[in-house]
Amino acid sequence: MNIFLIKLQCFLINLKGRVRGKQHLVYPEDNGLYRISDTQQSIYIARLNRHNRYKKGIAQGVDMLAEEYSLNEIDTKPGDILIECGANVGELSVWAKSHSLVYMGFEPEEKEFCCVKLNASKGAQVYRNALWHEKKTLTIHSLPGSGDSSVFDMGDAEGKFEIEAVRLDETIDLSDHSGTVILKVEAEGAEPEVLKGAIGLFDQIDYITVDCGPERGENQDYTFVEINRTLTNHGFKLLQAKFQRVTMLYYNTNRISL
């Protein structure tokens, strides 16, 4: 689509939004991304079809995602760390910024990765890598329009690309950090492999919030059983379960007394 048509499309979206009382405006950027703005702040997105997530304002859209992962249940303080696997455009980096948290994010899709870099606070660590249980090159079956790109082929991918995958515990260093560490994992069915690649950091992580929904392969299997086995075997206990998205929040019993 040429730039004139993109600008026209954004103009029509904004006109319709104002008539319907929506809070956000959409602006095309020269780099092929889109900037969403309301009266308080802006956020960059990669796919125009996802702009309606902010129709009630950016803060509300971001907070809603944080609540889906039970992040609002965690008592954080400035300087604590949020590590995110499956950052998409970095909505939770915006949430982390609003809570003065240190942010580390991983996102393999190129345009979404560019958004994370723009949305995260200055000094955030952002990696264009997949997370896995070993270092290797993975093929990603790309479905970015719905945020469903995966290492598993579900039969409806728009294309595919190769990306370097890394273990989380070989990529980041938490040895000098004394505050709370939160790990959020959303890997479109690959959550068990991501967690196996993070085991070396488990004794330094306080909370793990993970998507266990039906996203693994063509059968769209749930991943809860394997995830729960891995985490409970390493001292984590289930704290909160939300079934609309099927997300589970665990806490480290070796670090936290509840």
Image (cartoon, helix red, strand yellow):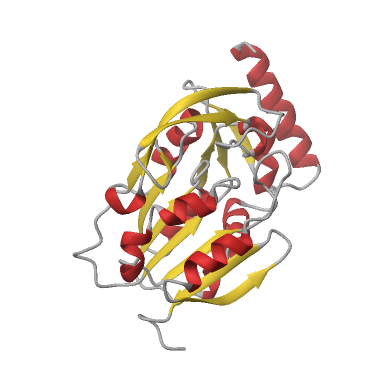
The reply to whether residue 93 is visible in this rendering is no
Q: Quadrant of residue 77?
A: bottom left
Q: Quadrant of residue 80?
A: bottom left
Where is residue 249 drawn, in percent x and y?
A: 55, 70
Between 70 and 135, the residue placed more toward the observer is: 135
Q: Judge from the rendering whether residue 231 lies leftward or rightward of residue 142; answer left or right.
A: left
Q: Quadrant of the N terminus?
A: top right
Q: Judge from the rendering whether residue 124 lies leftward or rightward of residue 132; answer left or right.
A: left
Residue pictured at 43% horizontal, 59% vertical: 96
Where is residue 93 drawn, in percent x and y?
A: 44, 52
Q: Quadrant of residue 240?
A: bottom right
User: Hey, which residue is sitting farthest bottom in the picture?
Assistant: 258
Q: Judge from the rendering whether residue 69 lies leftward or rightward of residue 128; answer left or right.
A: right
Where is residue 251 drawn, in percent x and y?
A: 47, 75
Residue pictured at 64% horizontal, 46% vertical: 216
Residue pictured at 74% horizontal, 41% vertical: 18
Between 193 and 80, the residue placed more toward the observer is: 193
Where is residue 205 drawn, in percent x and y?
A: 36, 68
Residue pictured at 46% horizontal, 51% vertical: 194
The reply to whether residue 194 is visible in this rendering is yes
Between 2 and 196, the residue placed more toward the observer is: 196
Q: Where 185 sits versus 240, above or below?
A: above
User: Hey, which residue is sitting farthest left in the picture?
Assistant: 176
Q: Judge from the rendering whether residue 64 lies leftward or rightward of residue 206; answer left or right.
A: right
